Image (cartoon, coloured by chain):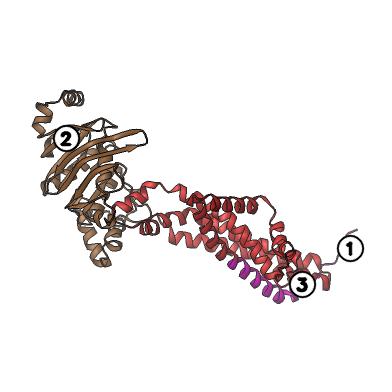
Chain colours: A brown, B red
Amino acid sequence: MIEIENVRKSFGPLEVLKGIDLTVKKGEVLTIIGGSGSGKSTLLTCINGLEPIDSGRIRVDGTEVHARGTDLNKLRRKLGIVFQQWNAFPHLTVIENVMLAPRKVLGIGKAEAAAIAEKQLSHVGLGDKLDVYPSRLSGGQQQRMAIARALAMSPGYMLFDEVTSALDPQLVGEVLDTLRMLASEGMTMICVTHEMKFAREVSDRVAFFSKGVMAEIGTPQQIFDAPLNAETAAFVKLTQD
Amino acid sequence: MFSYTFQWKQAFAKLPLMLDGALVTVEIALLSMALGIVLAVALTGFRLSGNRFLVAVTAAWVEVARNTPALFQIYMAHFGIASFGVHLSPYVSLLIGITFNNAGYLSENFRGALKAIPDTQARAARSLGMSAVQAFGYVVLPQMLRIAFLPITNQMVWAILMTSLGVTVGMNFDLYGVTQDLNALTFRTFELFALAAVIFYVITKIIQIGARLIANRLFRY
């Protein structure tokens, strides 16, 4: 379970998170929608401790992320994150990209790590690209590789930060299909996204962020068909036209 | 007017002595590169540390190394510090001078290479649970090495050529020093120095070809 309590975060004079409260249960798929600058991506990087917070509390399975004694390297093993920019490691082949963390972080042997990597890469449809360098892959393929790389650590949670935003339109579908597959397998996911159709389809709950505040959270039906908040309604209307 | 008679045979007779000298030249260049790389890594770290004093040390080092003649740097490493009562052998002075020059140039190359790797690479590595050291060692460093590889090769070639400046501080058993002494004994000036030039050329060519072969093996992406 991920518990977020009254989290505040500023970049200089700009307050990007103004007291966020949110709980994500095991097995849940939560999507976060909202305009740019609403703080949704920042929240994800706060959850895995890449960004410090100013006040409040984030707990992952009871471990407080920003507490002084927390071993973030250890905590991050159970929080897979995939970014808008997929950040393939260009000097490693596809399979080496996926094997690296299991080997060096979890200390798994080479053969076993290769087996894990191969399984995850086949899972995202890259089973025939194992020994290719990332520069030979399309954006969509690189993004799926990044997903496999995160999955290879057997995380309990997956955080997706606008993973289709940097892709050519024709490549968005293949990445969303991968996310749908993970959701159907019961993976606990938080997806920050601009893909409204996708959000409506896969989410258990949808949260709408606006100017650092979570303006509304509810079922996809509520958010998209009968939003209670005027801002949510305006945003949904704008993005569905 | 043109009355010089070439006597190549005399020069070739000295080839074994010159090749012995060439070994010393290669040895100094290799040592100065090994030390220079270590120092350059430290200087790069200094520059990135944000500590004012360390940044100033690096800046001064880089400025002097890159904007003064290598001859001056070697002179200072011998006669300069001798003024303060520190007397070093020509070999050590030459090694220090070239190392100083190498470190200055290489640290700038390393800084550039580091800058060329986007922060998001380390971020992605950290997100996978790697420590800062692991992220640097497995993700950032290998990519830096590729970018810095060619400059390192160039500097190695420079180091070989810079050894010739050792004669000015009394170095007499490297390739250039040996040639100089043989010239004083035999006066076969053109032949001896032409031969030395060919040996220098062959050494630097071997370095360049070798580096290309290594690069082809190492950097396949």
Residue B148: mark: none
Q: Amino acid at mark 1?
A: Ser
Q: Are marks 1 and 2 in contact (CB under 8 Å)?
A: no
Q: Is residue A162 visible?
A: no
- In space, the residues marked 3 and 2 are separated at their CA atoms by 86 Å
Q: Which mark lies nearer to you, 1 or 2?
A: 2
Q: Which residue is mark 3?
A: B11
- Residue under mark 1: which chain is it in? B
Most common secondary structure along the magenta stretch = helix
Element under disc 1: loop
Instruction: Judge left or right: residue A24 versus residue B84.
Output: left
Instruction: Let me know if residue B11 is in the magenta part.
Output: yes
Residue at 19%, 42% in the rendered image: A5
Magenta region, residue range: B3-31
Q: Nearer the viewer, residue A235 or A69?
A: A69
Answer above or below: position of B23 versus B44: below
- Residue under mark 2: which chain is it in? A
Q: Which residue is mark 2?
A: A207
Q: Is residue A238 visible?
A: yes
Mark 3 nearby-residue class (10 Å; few <14, some 14–19, many ≥20):
many
